[in-house]
Image (spheres, rainbow, N blue to C red):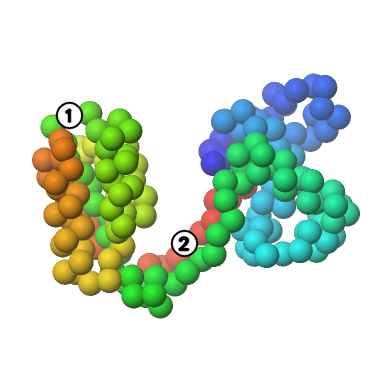
Amino acid sequence: MFDVVRTGECDSADRRYDMMSLTDNGVCMDEIDRALIARLQQDATTPYAALGQEVGLSGAAAHERVRKLRERGVIRRTTVDVDPAAVGKGVLAYVMIEANAWMGDASTGAALAALPWVEEAHIVAGGVSLLAKVRASTTVELQRALKEIFAIDGVTGTQTIVVLETFFERPIDV
């Protein structure tokens, strides 16, 4: 969400202009916004009073900042981090999807989103058209997911990488 930051390009009418930076999607943020996001990524249940105290604001001011970050689309949603193995989804695979035509349309996205095993899907450049992150309970279920992906109109093949172990996953560095 915060790919590259360019400083000094925010609206000069903003009183925090000198301390703000503009993200690639045109959102102005300052260091307090970034600190709030980083803390919420660690624990989204942190009370606003505690958030405010950590960044030098009142609880009400922290709440208002977070509300604006949501309103501007910086914070897309609040969720919980579930251990996939604990809920019976211990098989993780990345599926590279080959196609005979452009697959970047809404119908392809909808077809992948309809498959319960697909957690993420990306249009990519290179030797394949799409990359999907797939979770299943067993390799038999993974095979079923691959068959469903292969049945999507335009798909000509798949290449699958099964994850044996995950060293770490990290939140976006803001």
Left or right, 121 with respect to 139, comes to right
Give the CA distance from mark 2 to mark 1: 33 Å
Q: Mark 1 points at which residue?
A: 101
Residue contact between numbered discs 2 and 1, judged by CB atoms under 8 Å: no
Please name the residue shown 68% across and 65% down the image. Answer: 45
Q: Which of label 2 and label 1 is nearer to you?
A: 1
Q: Is residue 163 visible?
A: no
At which x and y percent is residue 96?
Answer: 23, 47
Q: What element carries label 2?
A: loop
Q: Earlier in the sequence, mark 2 or mark 1?
A: 1
Task: Name the residue nearer the viewer: 155 or 3.
Answer: 155
> Most extreme residue toward the bottom, as rendered?
86
Q: Is mark 1 on a helix, strand or loop?
A: loop
The amino acid pointed to by label 1 is: Ala
Q: Residue 169 carries which label?
A: 2
Looking at the figure, which quarter contains the N terminus? top right
The amino acid pointed to by label 2 is: Glu
